[in-house]
Each structure stands twice: as structure tokens, then as C-alpha cells.
Amino acid sequence: MNFSDLAKNRYSERYFDSRPVEQEKLDKILEAGRVVPTACNYQPQRFFVIRSEEAMEKLRAVTRFHYNAPLFLLVCYDIREVWKNPGDRCYENYNSGEQDASIAATTMMYEAEELGVHTIWVRGFDSKTVVDTFGLPEYMIPVMLLGLGYPNERAKANPWHFKRKPIGEFVTEL
Ligand SMILES: Cc1cc2nc3c(=O)[nH]c(=O)nc-3n(C[C@H](O)[C@H](O)[C@H](O)COP(=O)(O)O)c2cc1C
């Protein structure tokens, strides 16, 4: 499938089968998150694999948006390794961490899609609860959870997937 079709066909999966994601596919997905561009090439993105019963129990305690996906990646950035722009006058103490981690998460999401693994991007959690529950060091900042797995027989796109603003609302030529 070419990239345009991949981008259009992807939707947020909320109906997962219990079938695990193969290690080879997970390795490819993580590799896609490794090779992304980052500000100044500082590479602050970090990925935590959640799939053991113990880790899954913790995950279910930090978000209700788990949809029983058999695998999650907790995507974070290490704030000690981000590019900073203290001179930015719109943002106080701007750092690139959230952008870098989001690029990695997005790239992994599309790599998964290409491998036939469905995904759900989850931000419905409290960062402090995630840090405490998984025992992350204070310099590790959670950005998102990427749920991964195969669709079950009820799988379908939510109506929101088909609701997009027209291109003119996004684009302005300056
Ligand atoms: C930053 C971000 C946060 C999101 N958080 C959640 C979430 O916590 N729970 C959830 O069910 N979906 C979440 N989503 C999925 C969106 O609801 C979904 O992408 C949007 O409705 C468009 O639907 P589609 O992905 O099927 O095209 C999130 C998506 C993004 C990009």
C-alpha cells in the first residue's frame, strides 16, 4: 500500500483481539521510532514496552482507554536530552521533547499499520499517575500510550474517523 492510502485507511482501533503482536513486528515498529528526525538530533524519545500481565494491570489502572489491546508502548522523552529554546517569546522555556516523542509515536503508528497491526493513540491519562505507577525517574516525561494489536470481529472505525474539516480550514498561503 502506498503512503497516501495507508494514511487514509488508518483509524483508531478500539476493538482488539487477544492475539499477541509478534516480536519481529514489534522490533520493526520500535526501529521505526528510533530512526526519526529529532531537534538537533538529540534523540530524547524513549519507549517502554507494556505487555506482561503485571505491566498490563498497571496500565489498566492509569487509563480507561486501553480497549484490551495486548501491547502498549509508553512513549516518553528524557527531559535531560531535549533541545531547548529559552529565547522563544511565545513559549516559556520551550523544549522539543513533545515534538520529538510525537514524531516517533506517529512513525511507529504508521509502521504498525503497514505491518497489519492496528493502533490507538491514547492521551487520556494523568502523567503523574503514569510516572508513579510505572516508577519512572523524574526526568522521564510521558507523552502518549500507543495501543497495538489485531482487530477483533467487532472492529470498525469510529464515526469521528470520517469527520474531517475541509482542506481550506487547515491551509493558508502567506
Ligand atoms: C493526541 C491524541 C490523543 C488521543 N487520546 C485518545 C484517548 O485518550 N482515548 C481514545 O479513545 N482516543 C484517543 N485519541 C484518538 C482520537 O480520538 C482519534 O484519532 C480521532 O477521533 C480521529 O479518529 P481516527 O483516529 O479513527 O481517524 C487520541 C488521538 C490523539 C492524536
Image: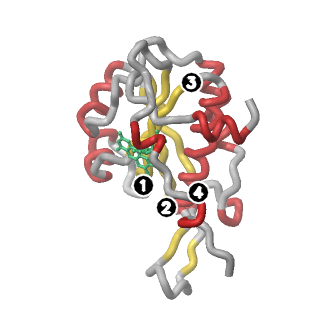
Reply above or below: 107 against 148.
Answer: below
Pinpoint residue 109: horizontal percent, then vertical percent.
Answer: 57, 38
Mark 1 within 8 Å of ligand 1, using the beta carbon: no
Amino acid on which disc 2 is placed: Ile
Pinpoint residue 75: horizontal percent, then vertical percent.
Answer: 48, 44
Q: Are marks 4 and 3 in contact (CB under 8 Å)?
A: no
* Comparing labels 1 and 3, the label whose residue is closer to the camera: 3
Q: Is residue 100 left or right of residue 31?
A: left
* Comparing labels 2 and 4, the label whose residue is closer to the camera: 4
Pinpoint residue 156: horizontal percent, then vertical percent.
Answer: 44, 25
- The quarter of the rendering in which ligand 1 is drawn is top left
Give the SS element for disc 3: loop
Q: Quadrant of residue 160?
A: top left
Residue that mark 1 sits on: 141
Dot 4 or dot 1: first in sequence order is 4
Residue that mark 3 sits on: 117
Pinpoint residue 145: horizontal percent, then vertical percent.
Answer: 42, 41
